[in-house]
DNA sequence: ACCTGAACACCGTTCAAGT
DNA sequence: ACCTGAACACCGTTCAAGT
């Protein structure tokens, strides 16, 4: 008995030791809060409490709450399944599978998909996703310059789809918005909005099929429309 | 002299009379604050102050801040120029002109475009925009069911474009995000991200031309890809 | 360089009470 | 039904001071 070392908890009080702060530690804590309580709770103050410090201590490692949210989102993209990139089979189907995985990850929390719509990601996970999508397009024989431009279009489309899927699951506040749009379209005055009246139900139809159609539209258009002649002086970002 | 009625300001104090609250009045005040100080300042408390009352008085006319923001955004869409809908000329160019007008309205404030990305609109101005886009697609001979699905795609694309254009003007916080992405792409490791390395500069090139290319992709795809067979039992929303 | 406490300048919304 | 004041439960960030 006397051989057992004294419990560390004695020298370190009851708490399991206060680890040194670090950017990684902050992001890891943010991920834990994200999964346990949602993005809404990922705040500077909340994280500081979790890390047993004051909010201002975090500013040594993170510029502001937006950068933290971006870091969390990038980290979350680790869950996107990129194995289809190196698999075999029709590249269009593999690309769609990758996008569906991305959509699933974001749709887990409606607010997450909305964040993805609004932040400009640039972390390693996002780069890996871009690289994967790019790889599939190039494997499909899409001209490089066109593939580069198409990635944005495809990922933006997928992100939007994630917000729709997300709000279908969680009957959150946005579910009410959606219901209001449905009602507005259903009851839209045929004199004032003749074209809406003409296609009323089509505007509200689809979903899975509609998403796939959207994807096919993007791919089909990408393959069909050449990029304009590039002026070498304008190839860089403004 | 004695015939002139006593100035109202006497009986009503110095202030120019406190008008009765109404939903329209609240939205009008919100629009004024929006234009004068930006969407960030369109808060319940700020509007209440402007209307010389307490924040809670507004809740009689507006469900919550999100509904108010949606109302403001819809109102703002009154500025979108829909005259090309009834004009003559190539329908594709007219549609692009309408979308550019929509983009301009949203790009005036980056935060506005971001809001548009996230809220589901259903007000009269938004319906008018949808009706106009729909009208042009139908005029172009696009099959009605396909036109209905294409509207969402086109408007989402335009909204995304507005956020990009918006952040190009205002060097706000998102401008920094953009700069970080540019750096990340420029310095992306060629071993880890081979496809990014292969098309590096193309990923960052374009802008005006890129937007127009995206639009052409959407139209071309819409014309090329038929919607799937509709099961009549599934044509309604869920 | 890193960490902190207190303070500033706000938020949206609930509640209970008034008219 | 409409309006209100006070309170609740938070925010992000600046500042000045500590180690």
Image (cartoon, coloured by chain):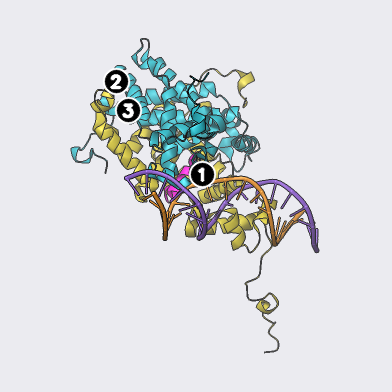
Chain colours: A cyan, B yellow, C purple, D orange
Question: In the drawing, what numbered circle is on residue A225?
Answer: 3
- The secondary element bearing badge 1 is classed as helix
Q: Is residue B97 visible?
A: no
- The quarter of the picture where the C terminus of chain A appears is top left
Q: Earlier in the sequence, mark 1 or mark 3?
A: 1
What is the CA distance from the residue labelled 2 to the residue labelled 1? 45 Å
- For disc 1, the neighbor class at 10 Å (few under 14, some 14 to 19, many from 20) is some
Question: In the drawing, what numbered circle is on residue A45?
Answer: 1
Q: Is residue A68 above or below residue A224?
A: below
| Percent of width and height locating residue A152 | 37, 31
- The secondary element bearing badge 2 is classed as helix
Horizontal relation, residue B16 to residue D14: left or right: right
Q: Chain of mark 1?
A: A
| Percent of width and height locating residue A31 | 48, 31
What is the CA distance from the residue labelled 1 to the residue labelled 3? 49 Å
Q: Are marks 1 and 3 in contact (CB under 8 Å)?
A: no
- For disc 3, the neighbor class at 10 Å (few under 14, some 14 to 19, many from 20) is some
Which residue is found at the position 34% from the left and 22% from the top? Answer: A132
Which residue is found at the position 44% from the left and 31% from the top? Answer: A28
Can residue A150 be found in the magenta stretch? no
Can residue B113 be found in the magenta stretch? yes
Q: Is residue A137 above or below residue A59?
A: above
> What residue occupies the far left of the structure in this picture?
A232
What is the CA distance from the residue labelled 3 to the residue labelled 2? 16 Å
Q: Give the residue number, with chain letter if any, for mark 2.
A: A138
């Amino acid at each position: 008995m006397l051989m057992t070392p004294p419990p560390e908890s004695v020298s370190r009080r009851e708490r399991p030791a206060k680890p040194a702060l670090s950017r990684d530690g902050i992001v890891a804590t943010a991920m834990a809060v994200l999964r346990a309580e949602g993005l809404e709770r990922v705040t500077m103050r909340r994280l500081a409490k979790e890390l047993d410090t004051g909010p201002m201590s975090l500013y040594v490692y993170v510029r502001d709450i937006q950068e933290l949210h971006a870091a969390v989102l990038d980290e979350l993209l680790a869950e996107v399944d990129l194995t289809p990139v190196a698999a075999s089979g029709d590249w269009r189907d593999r690309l769609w599978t990758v996008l569906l995985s991305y959509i699933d990850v974001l749709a887990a929390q409606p607010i997450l998909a909305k964040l993805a719509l609004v932040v400009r990601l640039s972390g390693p996970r996002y780069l890996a996703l871009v690289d994967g999508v790019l790889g599939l397009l190039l494997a499909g024989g899409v001209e490089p310059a066109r593939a580069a431009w198409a990635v944005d279009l495809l990922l933006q489309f997928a992100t939007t789809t994630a917000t729709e899927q997300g709000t279908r699951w969680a009957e959150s506040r946005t579910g009410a918005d959606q219901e209001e749009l449905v009602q507005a379209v259903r009851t839209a005055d045929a004199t004032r909005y003749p074209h809406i009246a003409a296609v009323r139900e089509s505007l509200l139809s689809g979903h899975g099929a509609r998403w796939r159609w959207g994807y096919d539209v993007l791919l089909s258009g990408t393959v069909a429309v050449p990029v304009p002649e590039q002026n070498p002086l304008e190839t860089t970002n403004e």
